[in-house]
Image (cartoon, coloured by chain):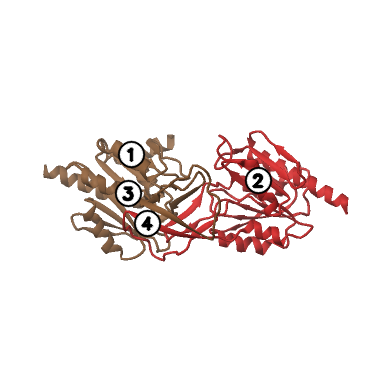
Chain colours: A red, B brown
Amino acid sequence: IIFHSIEKLLTPQDLAGLDVLVTAGPTREPLDPVRYLSNRSSGKMGYALARVAALRGARVTLVTGPTSLIPPPGVEAIRVETAREMYDAVLQHFEQADLVIKAAAVADYRPQDVSSQKIKKQGQDMQLQLTRNPDVLAELGRRKKDHQLLVGFAAETNDLEQNALAKLTRKNLDLLVANDVTIPGAGFDYDTNVVRIFGRDGEVESLPLMDKNRVAQKILDRVAKLLTTRRGAK
Amino acid sequence: IIFHSIEKLLTPQDLAGLDVLVTAGPTREPLDPVRYLSNRSSGKMGYALARVAALRGARVTLVTGPTSLIPPPGVEAIRVETAREMYDAVLQHFEQADLVIKAAAVADYRPQDVSSQKIKKQGQDMQLQLTRNPDVLAELGRRKKDHQLLVGFAAETNDLEQNALAKLTRKNLDLLVANDVTIPGAGFDYDTNVVRIFGRDGEVESLPLMDKNRVAQKILDRVAKLLTTRRGAK
């Protein structure tokens, strides 16, 4: 905490007064009290964004799925498990937020029926009926007010640019951070990442392999630039 | 490591010369490069057993699914992800083992088809076709030689005693450690556990809430007792 205070003293407070909502980690979608569907998100990228935003002076709320990480100092952490819990927590904090960064990997589908008892093994095969989860990011895109900035992520294994640009438009985002999770050192569970930042203004920034804290700085630099431009336009 | 050496000096070496194979943690069954099916096992119980067995003088091999834990000192750790990888690793080390403790929570089913690319959202509903994984414990029960001891676990949410006794017989186990994961402080992700140890000899021991290291001691006490009885019978 002392170290954090000193680090903050040495960091330009260019996000001071900004309310930032960051989501991080995977969600878990239970089948029964024991089993669940999830994904490989470690939460590291989202936690790095929360940490750096707080250092740069923002008030940060971190809505986080299950991870083994410790929330950064000075950040209000809200723990959730399922996509629906994340949806509720995010919508509850959305209105007061100036900037929302959705780094969480929210499950698209959940098991339709959740058994209250541990399911016993039955036959050789089993069918699991899945149903669609609410799309947090799309809903935020719909509700977004003029003064709010929305940053999304896309973890892709193929057709990165095409998928990224489509998502940027479809979900009404200001920035989209895309990474190809098949590149060594990029994406899930690594401390490093290789990303491309797509802006609604058409600006694309391709970053080399770097530490996730450094990636977080770069993303927030882009955000700070957007904020300055907007203020200038008023 | 120094602390471990001192602790070991102070611990009776009643498992000296014993080859112990411990499995721990969950397995992950991928749907695609990003998503997977898993369960809430933290690996803590298995890691505690490996640690305590090594302290008591055994040579310990730990086959572990993905956890956030650090393997105990003096233990050979083999990391696996899926049930089939665990099956292979366990069978490879089974023959030389005198004692096998299967604390891992191995997935009963895996997705039938694994997509090499991230699956894109499609309709409102989705069907996931699952197929049965090989049953590690049952296979070990079949292959078990007279000098080998086999200890299994059962995480139950209902009908604990009935399910435990059936499993003990069906899988040819020497001991079965059962816990009701619905009890607060018992089972997944807790540092404590509430277990009942069922012996093939009919002896049942119900232990109160205790630290998982303490539970590990108790389980290995039962194993040591079985070994002494067997040696006496020869």
Which amino acid lies under the numbered mark 1 shown in the image of this protein? Asp
> Visible in this render: residue A13?
no
- Between residue B19 and residue A195, name the one nearer to us: A195
Same chain under badges 3 and 4? The reply is no
Report x, y in % for residue A176: 68, 47
Label placed on residue B217: 3
The residue labelled by disc 2 is A164
Label 4 element class: strand
Which amino acid lies under the numbered mark 4 shown in the image of this protein? Met
Q: Earlier in the sequence, mark 2 or mark 4?
A: 4
Which amino acid lies under the numbered mark 3 shown in the image of this protein? Gln
The residue labelled by disc 1 is B88
Same chain under badges 2 and 4? The reply is yes
- Between residue B168 and residue B27, name the one nearer to us: B27
Same chain under badges 3 and 1? The reply is yes
Instruction: Give the number of marks.
Output: 4
Label 2 element class: helix
Q: Chain of mark 4?
A: A
> Visible in this render: residue A135?
yes
Q: Is residue A1 above or below residue A115?
A: above
Q: CA distance from mark 3 to mark 4?
A: 38 Å
Residue A191 lies left or right of residue B10; in this view the side is right
Report x, y in % for residue A133: 55, 60
Foreground mark, 1 or 2, reads 2
Q: CA distance from mark 1 to mark 2?
A: 39 Å
Q: Residue at x 35, y 46 (%)?
A: B49
Q: Chain of mark 2?
A: A
Q: CA distance from mark 2 to mark 4?
A: 35 Å
